[in-house]
Amino acid sequence: MFAMQLALLSNLPARRQGGTLSVGESLASHGPEVIYREVTCRNVLGRSPAAEKMGYPFSWTVNPYRGCEIGCTYCYARATHEYLGADPQAFENEIFVKLGAERTVARALRPEHFRNGNAGGAEIAIGTVTDPYQPAERRYRLTRRILERLVHFSGLTLSVTTKSPLVTDDAELLGSIARKSDLTVHMSLISLDADLLRHLEPKGATPEARLSAIARLTAAGVRVGLFIMPLIPGLNDDPAAVRRLEAAARSAGAAFVVRQRLSLRDATWPTLEASLREHYPEVHRNLSRRMLSRSLRQQKTA
Ligand code: SF4
């Protein structure tokens, strides 16, 4: 099914930043240049039984873009490009833009999404596999348009997850939604070390910019939580450094902190491995050993 979807998408026109691209032109010949593939969205609101099974607190997801230009080397969502039959290494260079997504979101809402008495409705999580405020948002404003639809409803349970300060462009809009629905913004920041972020999140914002974004959203009346995901053994999991990060986020206004350890996946490993080998050889050696023993375990159980 995914191969079929990709075939469909591949027939649609593509745009490069600053120009158009003929269909079928090779990504590889354009180096790191980013291609936007505009696709017509039929339904941006997706059910996520997998998330429910894994214990995540959301069951509906909204991802206005596929692929993510921020390009974190540890990003588990690279696998979603693989599911579509595309190269996970093109995850940050080939961005699918779901045009018309905002028109589909309101009509997909169901009674279960709305608060019933004191109980919250089924959570709609915006930005579960790609960042809804990645650079494409400057140009397409899909996330903003979706929020402009959602602000007309009351009693929803919503979350937005991002590591981009671009979210503050919508601070007032998010504040209006927060007055009518249960809204949380998750700001993702794994370290206060700007060098480390530069190596692992090539187009990510500085720690200062993300902390300022927390403060700006909080001032607009939005509840913000800090996501420290992933904690990579030997790299950003030093307890004192994590405490400093949490304290900085809390003094900017973060109401809570969620931490999660790295989950090694085959689709993620080649990109993460390359950056670790170059910049953090000791961490690379440790994680390589873990990957090796994991694959040996898998071979034994196969
Ligand atoms: S910002 Fe999020 S979705 Fe985008 S590459 Fe980084 S981890 Fe993946």
Image (cartoon, rainbow, N blue to C red):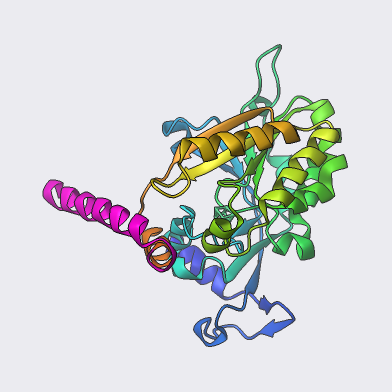
Q: Residue at x 47, y 32 (%)?
A: 52
- Vertical arrangement, residue 83 with respect to residue 151, above or below: below
Q: Quadrant of ligand 1?
A: bottom right
Q: Residue at x 70, y 48 (%)?
A: 210
In the foreground, 77 or 261: 261
In the foreground, 124 or 131: 131
Main secondary structure found in the magenta portion: helix
Q: Residue at x 41, y 69 (%)?
A: 278
Whether residue 58 appears in this view of the structure is no
Q: Residue at x 11, y 49 (%)?
A: 300
Residue 247 lies, in percent from the top left, at: 64, 33
Q: Place residue 197 in its image quadrant.
A: bottom right
Asked if the magenta segment contains residue 162, the reply would be no
Residue 190 lies, in percent from the top left, at: 55, 46
Residue 16 lies, in percent from the top left, at: 67, 79
Q: Which residues are magenta?
A: 277-302
